Image (cartoon, rainbow, N blue to C red):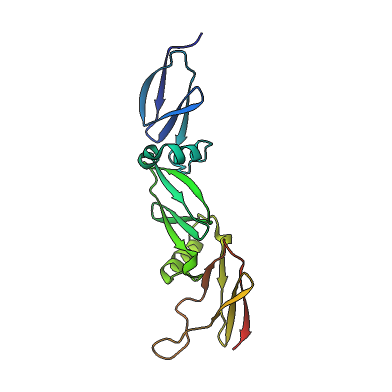
Amino acid sequence: MMKLIQRTTVKKNERALLLRNGSFDRVLQSGTYWLFAGLDQLRVETFALEQPAFTHGLADYLMAQEPAVVAAEFVQVNLSEQQVGLRSENGVLVEILPPGTRRLYWKGLVEVSVQVVDLQAGAELPAALVARLTQTQLRQRSVTGLAGVLQVQVPEGQCALLTVDGKVERLLRLAPTPSGSTAAPWPWRWWICACKPWKYRARTS
């Protein structure tokens, strides 16, 4: 027998989607609900906020048709084909998002932020970002997407050629410091290579 009224509880560390006849109805915050079904079929899908990524078939629908819901409940990522995202959880870098990424992350428990890197501005990452990437080697949690970052080391006495799409982009070499030496402030140069086939080859200077 079909129940006209259904009772459901969403825990404090959860969010839920209410689906009516298979279609999105609304997001349920934590609490206890008495839901009037009438002749409709109701389904409640719960999500643990400890895992903020919203990997659901309704993600594209929500981004396209429910902008108010997305703004209230999610952190939205919408990268162009010339952008890469550095995603952090509670201030800690956890993932490198490739170009063209479109995703939603639940708000409410884990603070998700995404720093966008413009690939058209150049391949080399700023020193501050390099420091964040090198620090990941000291933490137990690995960073997803590191395969999209090319580490280039230019040994002393050598230089390197950076090519993009088979064309020489620029010459890489140790820049002189104010004191006149060629000691590099960072032993590695980092390059985002998730979008284009960026390569380098070293040669004797």
Q: Quadrant of the C terminus?
A: bottom right
| Horizontal and vertical percent position of residue 28 | 39, 30
Vertical relation: 177 (above or below) 189: below
Q: Residue at x 49, y 27 (%)?
A: 23
| Horizontal and vertical percent position of residue 195 | 57, 61
| Horizontal and vertical percent position of residue 110 | 39, 45
Vertical relation: 20 (above or below) 1: below
| Horizontal and vertical percent position of residue 146 | 55, 60
Q: Nearer the viewer, residue 138 or 86?
A: 86
Furthest residue in direction bottom, as rendered: 180
Residue 67 found in image quarter: top left
Furthest residue in direction top, as rendered: 1
Vertical relation: 130 (above or below) 20: below
Q: Count every numbered label the image shows and give the total.
A: 0
Residue 13 found in image quarter: top left
In the drawing, does residue 125 fall left or right of residue 33?
Answer: right
Vertical relation: 156 (above or below) 149: below
Q: Residue at x 49, y 18 (%)?
A: 41
Q: Nearer the viewer, residue 174 or 103?
A: 103
Q: Nearer the viewer, residue 39 or 95?
A: 39
